[in-house]
Amino acid sequence: MKPIAISILTVCGIPELVEHEARQVTHVLSILDPEEPEPAALVRFAPHYRTTLRFHDAIEPGPDVVLPEAAHVAEILSFGRELTASASGRQEGHLLVHCHAGISRSTAALTMLLAQVYPDQSADALLSRVLDMRPKAWPNLRMMEFADEQLGRGGELVRAAGRIYRHQVETRSHIADFMRQHRRGREVDLAERS
C-alpha cells in the first residue's frame, strides 16, 4: 500500500478540537459515544472528508454499552484505504483522529491506520510513533484485537499495546486502579505480562 499523502497526523479529544479549527484539516475520523452530540467545533473546520463511528470506549460488555466490533474496525480500515486511494489527487493532507478524550479509541484507530499503510514496520515502532504524538495513549484493546486479526499481524499489535499499557502503569501510578474500576482489567493484566 502506498503512503497516504498525509503530511500531518493529529490525535485528540473533543475539548481540543477548537485548537485545530484553523489548521487546514483535510480528513477527520470521529469516534463518538452513541449518545454524544456532534462536536460543535467541527462545523468551523474548513471543508473536509469525515467518517464518524459511534461506540463506547469499552472492552467488556455491560449495561447499555455499545462495544467496538469487528465491523467498526473494518470501517476504520476502509477509511484508510479511501485515504490511500485519494492520495494521488492531493499534494498533502492533515488527518485528525479524535474520540472523547483522545486516549483510547483514537489512538487505537491511528495505530491500525499506520499498521495498514506501513505493513513492514513493527507494531512497537508504530505504537512508539503514536505515543510520541499522544503521550497519554492507552489504545483500546478490543479494537487492537480486531485490527490484529484483520491486518494479519498475528497478535503483534496486541503485544505492543501491552508494552504501552506497562509504560503507562509505570509512569502513571493511578492508571491501573482506574482502568480496573472501569472494566478494563484485561488491559492491566496484559501490562503485567508484558
Image (spheres, rainbow, N blue to C red):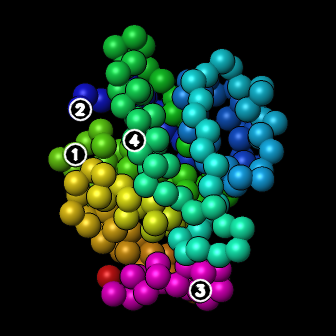
Marks 3 and 4, Cα distance to the nearest angstrom?
A: 29 Å
The residue type indicated by label 2 comes to Met
In magenta stretch: residue 180: yes
Which numbered disc, 3 or 2, marks the residue that appears first in the sequence?
A: 2
Please give left or right for residue 28 compared with residue 88 in the image: right
Residue 90 percent coordinates (x, y): 42, 13
The residue carrying mark 4 is 77
> In the structure shown, which secondary structural element does the residue marked by tag 1 occupy?
loop
Front tag of 1 and 4: 4
Marks 1 and 3, Cα distance to the nearest angstrom?
A: 32 Å
Marks 3 and 2, Cα distance to the nearest angstrom?
A: 38 Å
The residue carrying mark 3 is 180
Marks 1 and 4, Cα distance to the nearest angstrom?
A: 13 Å
Q: Give the range drawn in magenta.
A: 175-193
Determine the image quadrant of residue 92: top left
Determine the image quadrant of residue 105: bottom right
The residue carrying mark 2 is 1
**Numbered mark located on residue 119 in the image:** 1
**Numbered mark located on residue 182 in the image:** none
Task: Please tell me how crowded label 1 is: few (under 14), some (14-19), or many (20+) other residues with Cα within 10 Å.
Answer: some
> In the structure shown, which secondary structural element does the residue marked by tag 2 occupy?
loop
